[in-house]
Amino acid sequence: MVIPAKYVHTNLIAEDWQALANFYEQFFGCIPVPPERDYQGEKLEAGSGIPGAHLRGVHLRLPGYGDNGPTLEIFNYNILESRNKTAVNRPGFGHIAFTVDDVIAAQKSVLQAGGKAVGEIVTLQTATGAKVTWCYVTDPEGNIIELQSWSN
């Protein structure tokens, strides 16, 4: 049975939610969707399973979808687990992707902002003949981003 659903958001837990939100605003044109979130108390503790949890952050409207499009939710918990080594092949959520005009220029901008390269820029041809030039980079906190550009 298919559950009637509509995609709403993807969440990133940040060490510094304000700096990470600023990165996505500056480099990908994400737009804050007020209000900033600031949650704590019994309901958050019960829902998150984290005693003493305090959650702060913001939703950013993703580019290309208008006022009702999905958001990137960037939050910070007052209690954080340690981060695993960045890996594109770790089971679970792997990366977010943005279509850009120029993968080389976009990669350079991300690296100058404190991101890191993961692999090289490559071009693959799909079964339909379309070509995608892409690479993986990380944001300044180590979350993986795919930068891609399509051509025929």
Image (cartoon, helix red, strand yellow):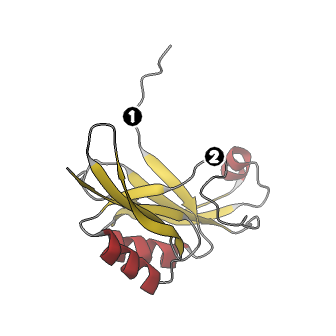
Q: Nearer the viewer, residue 7 or 98?
A: 98
Other-residue count near label 1 (Cα within 10 Å), few / some / many at <14 / 14–19 / ≥20: few
Spot occupied by residue 85 in the image (x, y as percentages of width and height): 71, 66
- Residue 4, position as x, y percentages in the image: 42, 23
Q: Is residue 56 above or below residue 124?
A: below
Give amino acid for label 1. Lys
Mark 2 element type:
loop
Report the amino acid beneath label 2: Gly
Q: Secondary structure at mark 1?
A: loop
Residue drawn at 69 percent across, 56 percent down: 41
The answer to whether one can see residue 11 in this image is yes
Residue 92 numbered mark, or none:
2
Q: State which mark lies toward you, 2 or 1.
A: 2
Lateral position of residue 98 relative to residue 141, left or right: left
Q: Closest to the observer: 2 or 99?
A: 99
Residue 27 image point, x, y percent: 35, 74
Where residue 5 appears, x then y in whole percent? 42, 29
Residue wearing tag 1: 6
Task: Compare residues 39 and 66 and report the one nearer the observer.
Answer: 66
